[in-house]
Amino acid sequence: MNDRLPHEKGFHVSWDQIHRDSRALAWRLDGRGPLNGGWKAVVAITRGGMAPAMIVARELDIRTVDTISVKSYDHQSQNEAQVLKAPDAEMMGDGTGILVVDDLVDSGKTLELVRRLYPQAHFATVYAKPKGEPMVDTFITGVSQDTWIFFPWDMALQYVEPYRGKD
């Protein structure tokens, strides 16, 4: 029996690490777009995909950036995914030439919803859990399904008691 809370098997990601991993994602995507190796636009899945999408767009010199807002979490509980804000419909079409970026694919429900809307888009995430991997085309780092990833935009620095002792 696993008595751990989600935060007890955590993978802490710093700003430096998300930047390095997002650049690695850009390098992996370079030259793989359907438009002579390029991409028409980057669409970030908000909110977690915004920082990686900005870094990917910069690295690949993609000037058209939009967002799709999908809500699937309340704190650490996953719910049914729903679109709150869609990107420009004319730009998106069926997704051809569009690079959709998120920080993490967990269960795959968010990407499944977005893929139904834009079936020809390329889906890229920085991190991927096993249940969600079938929904993503490109990712950098795989983590176990029971790992909770702590992203730097969700964290604050604070004092932590030593494991042993008080000094």
Image: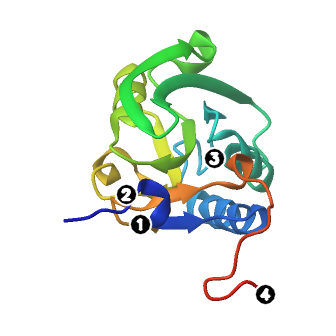
- Tell me: 17 left or right of 79: right
| Direction from residue 72 to residue 112 in the image, left or right | left
Task: Give the spatial CA distance, label 3 vs label 2.
Answer: 27 Å
Q: Mark 2 touching mark 1, by CB under 8 A?
A: yes
Q: Which mark is residue 38?
A: 3
Task: Reply above or below: 67 against 56.
Answer: above
Q: CA distance from mark 4 to mark 2?
A: 38 Å
Q: Amino acid at mark 1?
A: Val
Instruction: Give the label, 4 or 3, closer to the camera.
Output: 4
Instruction: In this rendered view, identify the residue nearer to me: 120 or 126.
Output: 126
CA distance for labels 4 and 3: 55 Å
Quarter of image, res 94: top left
How many callouts does the rendering have?
4
Side of 105 where 165 appears, left or right: right
Q: Is residue 7 visible?
A: yes
Please name which of the two marks, 1 or 4, marks the residue nearer to the observer. Answer: 4
Give the distance between the C-alpha atoms of the residues marked 2 and 1, in whole angstroms: 5 Å
Residue holding disc 1: 143
Write down the quadrant of residue 43 in the picture: top right
Question: The residue tagged with tag 2: helix, strand or loop?
Answer: loop
User: Dots 1 and 4: beta carbons under 8 Å?
Assistant: no
Residue 86 quadrant: top right
Marks 3 and 2 in Cβ contact (< 8 Å): no
What is the x, y in percent for residue 165?
A: 67, 88
Q: Residue flagged by tag 2: what amino acid is it?
A: Lys
Q: Nearer the viewer, residue 32 or 84?
A: 84
Q: Residue at x 44, y 67 (%)?
A: 9
Q: Which residue is mark 4?
A: 167
Q: Which of the two labelled residues, at mark 1 and mark 4, occupies the earlier sequence position?
A: 1
The mark that comes first in sequence, 4 or 3, is: 3
Q: Residues within 10 Å of mark 3 (few under 14, many from 20)?
A: some
